[in-house]
Image: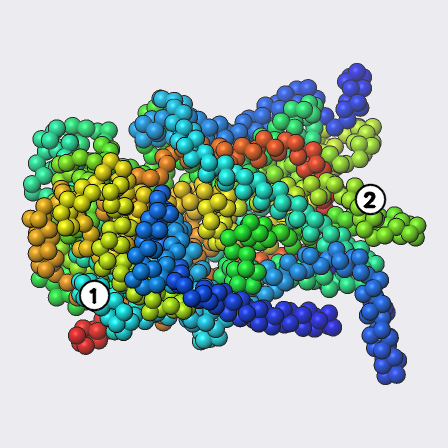
Amino acid sequence: MAKWQKVVAITGLAAGLAVTLSACGNNKSSSSSSSSKGPTTLTMYQIGDKPKQYDAMIKRANKILVKKANAKLKITYIGWGDYSQKMSVIVSSGEHYDIAKADNYAVNAQKGAYADLTKLLPKYAPEAYKQIDSAYIKGNKIDGKLYAVPVNANVYSTQVISFNKKFVDKYNIDISKVNSYETLNSALKAFHAKDKNTVALAAGKGFKVESNFDYPLGNTLPFAVDISKGANGKKIVNQYDTAQMQASLAAMHKYYQAGYISQDAATSNTDYPIASNTWFARQETQGPFDYGDFQLNNTAGKKDAIESKAITVPLKSLSQSQVFDWVVGNGSEHKELAVKVLGLINTDKTLLNGLVWGAEGTDFNKTGTDKIKLTSKYDPSNQMGAWMTGNNKNLYTTDAITDKMIKERDTSIKAAKSSPLLGFTPDTSSVKTEITNIQNVMNQYIDGLNTGTSDPKPTIKKMDKALKGAGYDKVQKLLQKQYTEFLAKQ
Amino acid sequence: MWRKKEISTVEIRSFGPGANLCFNILVALFAISCLLPLIFIIVISFSSEHALVTNGYQFWPSQWSTAGYEYLSHMSGKLLNALGVTLLVTVLGTAINATFTATYAYSISRSSFRYRRFFTLFCLITMLFTPGMVANYIVMTNLLQLKDTLWALILPMAVSPFNIIVMRTFFKRQVNESIIEAARIDGASEMRIFCQIVLPLAVPGIATISLFAALGYWNDWFNALLYIQNTRLVPLQYLLMQIQSNIQMLSQNATQGAQYATGLSNIPKEATQMAMVVISVAPIALSYPFFQKYFVRGLTIGGVKE
Amino acid sequence: MPNPEPEMPTVQPETPEEKAARKKENRQNFWYSVRDNTPLLLFVIPGAIWMIFFFYIPVFANVVAFKDFQFDPNGFVASLARSPWVGFKNFEFLFSSNAAWVITRNTVLYNLGFISLNLIISVFFAVVMSQLRNRRLTKVYQTSMLLPYFLSWVIISYFVYAFLSPNQGLLNSMITGNGGKAISWYNAPQFWPFILLFVGTWKGIGYNSILYFASAMSIDPTLFEAAEIDGANKWQQIKNVTLPALVPLMTLMTILAIGNIFRADFGLFYQVPQNSGSLYNVTSVLDTYIYNGLTATGDIGMSSAAALYQSLVGFILLMTSNFIVRRVDPESALF
């Protein structure tokens, strides 16, 4: 017994040591950054690969930041696939950082990981705050508080089916009547008859058939609000139980059986590059800053390579409002400064365009106030992506984008409908167990259903039974209750 | 009959010639099935991208190409650097791991060591739970302040409690306490006893735990994911893993629009990935046969009863 | 605990005076004994320090399994202090749903399958290899058989995919070539228990058989000679000499495997079936269930709860099986 007591005593001692030491460690690491009188260096975590010209890019940016805010940025890049895991460790461990791309925004914000910017943002970055579309602000509010500086870009999105123009022209296929998955049949059939070796409809693991829904907990869970014309948008439903979803899935299943979709779609990670001719039709997401098919054509590398047909109404959705959020760490010592810097990134045109387009004179030349011409040296992988940096309205545009296109863009933003879900962040902490179980049930069925691999009728029946066992009803009731309360407050 | 009997007394363990042939074929077939994946990877790494896209993975592609390796030669600086990091971490880590594990195990195997029960228990308890990623991260970054250093790749695997217990059994069985006692009476120090008497007896065991440690260090990418941000300190397996997870993440979000597509275009394609696999597997596969002698002997730990 | 030799003096009732005197003596003896044991203590210290830093300090974070984790700006310890206790709520997801039964069943059954298959096949190969005439060839066999053991599951999964791919897979080309109907392997759960058992065993067989081979080679040759003289044929020699000599190692390996019966090889069950949803009923095991369920929510309370559950069950099983083996045959026990 004495041995056990010794072990307990020693481990207890070790624990005590741990607590004191970790406290020391915390103080030390946080005080070191603010000791000097010069510009304060802010640490920033960003998703993606490090830009090839990072050093030149950050030097340009810091010159402006030192002058305007006496601050410097140090950006650490974490790969696409690692960001979620690494950020969750950084956030849980309480490591100090100043700015980061939000990860799992709603959940982490609710638990207190991010600084409350409700007052800070209008105070320290008033200009940027004013310029951000109100749908973004509303969509990022959690229980009335704002924790993010969203990047103002594609505020609404339309789901479209994009067609490879080369094949459309070559085989003279009529795509004019396409407005949903059900109406896609004749086009796919015509193509498949002519070319059996190319995939008619590109779909792989993680593919999700989109319809007129918005999702309170993301589109991998069944919970959805119907936002199509005529629906009242007040009910939380299971998207797979609705007639419109079932019709789309039935159509997908038909296409799968006819061989229009790759036979291993449910498990395949094959990417069908936009620029390649490995596909005929695909689902894409488009927003105002894509200028119709302009952006897709750009990726494809030539004009008129792609033609798209919308299958949903343009919607300022909850998920769209949180596509790219900057957050300030709750442990940051320089919250005000971080907000100020984020404000500058969003509003200072020289700074923002330097981050996105590169250096004036080498990567681009100015042809008008906000117009530029890219040089041969320009390479998007040298700098940051536009959608993950700052307000896209303040970006210079290339010659290819006419004033008419910009005007159309702005009117389309005004015309787009807002999702009733904006600003609704359910508190799911009491049903964590159920949600985890539901997630597992969904993982089992979601890829099979959405890629058309499984027959929707019997599969959905089985899935609903499994969902019931996993606690679907409890979560649905809770969400509905919170949602009704939320709507009543509006 | 008599002649046959003579032969079999010479090779007392062996089969007769007929059975020998049958079993040889059987084992050879299985051995070939084990070699296939490596051959397969090498073939893919030499397949042309076009053949891969249209026909998928094949053992005999319709079109050969060295494009995968050519792409790698463009990033050879990064690759060589990663290879250097991996080598350094593996060598240093293995040395540390083998030393710490062997000394600890030796001490608790000695019945004259007064605190051996305590330290055996101390080690056993660590096998009971796993501390969890976040807590380890805090110890490494806050307490030890070793984030972004080579030590962050070495220390997390510097001791393996399980190997300690196995080695303890090994020492107990291989090293006779009476020899040690005799040496002590002759006035040899503990250090000398360990180095000159115990170590030579324990070579197979140490070789085996070293091989496992080396394998662990060579294949580790997770510690790099947690602790390494400096691109100069990225080990080979993490480089591979990053590409892998980037592809998965990006291709599953491909419908999110043109923005994700630009991210995808920077990623090497399948032939290149396989070429990287070849490069990362080759050193281990090539150096293993040299270890094999010790390895086979060392694996009898706990199996051999004197 | 693990100590075969009797160390404690025989227990005899002692008077209070004797006890006090012994205590005093003990205190003095403590420093003497530290001095006496200094060299061996120094040997232990690096490992012990490592254990303190990489186990005894961080392990306390496991309390998060019993808390609803909330963030605090003052770091992890403050966050822990701030988070409310929730008892065993974080463990519920492992037991509450209908799937819980399926995943537990899969995990245990697959592991039992692996334990028995590994035992039979690797002992078979080991015995065969120990009897082959050409030693050099045997070495070549062993080297190649160990190769899969070094490869990661991602690579193995590509390899399996080359056989099972619905469009271009080797198996389907063979089936259609003979006039059959192509099978969508990744949507056909009935095949997967066999595929998984086969692939999992195949990967580990090289390592395991070398283990038994080494043990078989260390058998005293005179035993075979004696058997030969007694007129035993090959099969009888194997049955009566080789196999009994392998029993202790077989027991040891089984004890270790039983300790891990609640842990599944994540790569095998996640990468090899390509995480295909329609196979979940037969491929879902504890590790993949935890991973799939928690990547979305990223709740560290629930993930530590899952890890705690697995380690605890594993430890209890390991101890129990070791205890039973010690009762039956003390020599074969792990510790």
Label 2: which residue? B196
Q: Which residue shows up at 24% across the image and 51% down it?
A: A353
Please name the amino acid that badge 2 sits on: Gln
Quarter of the figure that contains the C terminus of chain A: bottom left
Please state which of residues C30 and A402 is positioned toward the viewer in this rendering.
A402
Quarter of the figure that contains the N terminus of chain A: bottom right
Q: Is residue A470 visible?
A: no
Instruction: Tell me how far mark 2 sits from mark 1, CA to CA.
Output: 76 Å
Asked if residue C110 is positioned above or below residue C163 in the image, the reply reads below
Asked if residue B15 is positioned above or below residue C255 in the image, the reply reads above
Q: Which residue shows up at 85% across the image and 52% down it?
A: B189
- Number of dots carrying numbers: 2
Instruction: Tell me where residue C203 appears, x and y as whole percent.
Output: 54, 38
Numbered disc 2: what chain? Answer: B
Please state which of residues A346 and C87 is positioned toward the viewer in this rendering.
A346
Q: Residue furthest bottom?
A: C16
Please name the amino acid that badge 1 sits on: Glu
Q: Which residue shows up at 44% across the image and 26% down it?
A: B43
**Mark 2 Cα-neighbour bin, 10 Å: few <14, some 14–19, many ≥20:** few
In the rendered structure, the answer to whether residue B130 lies left or right of residue A138 reads: right
Label 1: which residue? A127
Q: Are marks 2 and 1 in contact (CB under 8 Å)?
A: no
| Residue B144 occupies quadrant | bottom right
Numbered disc 1: what chain? Answer: A
| Residue B121 occupies quadrant | bottom right
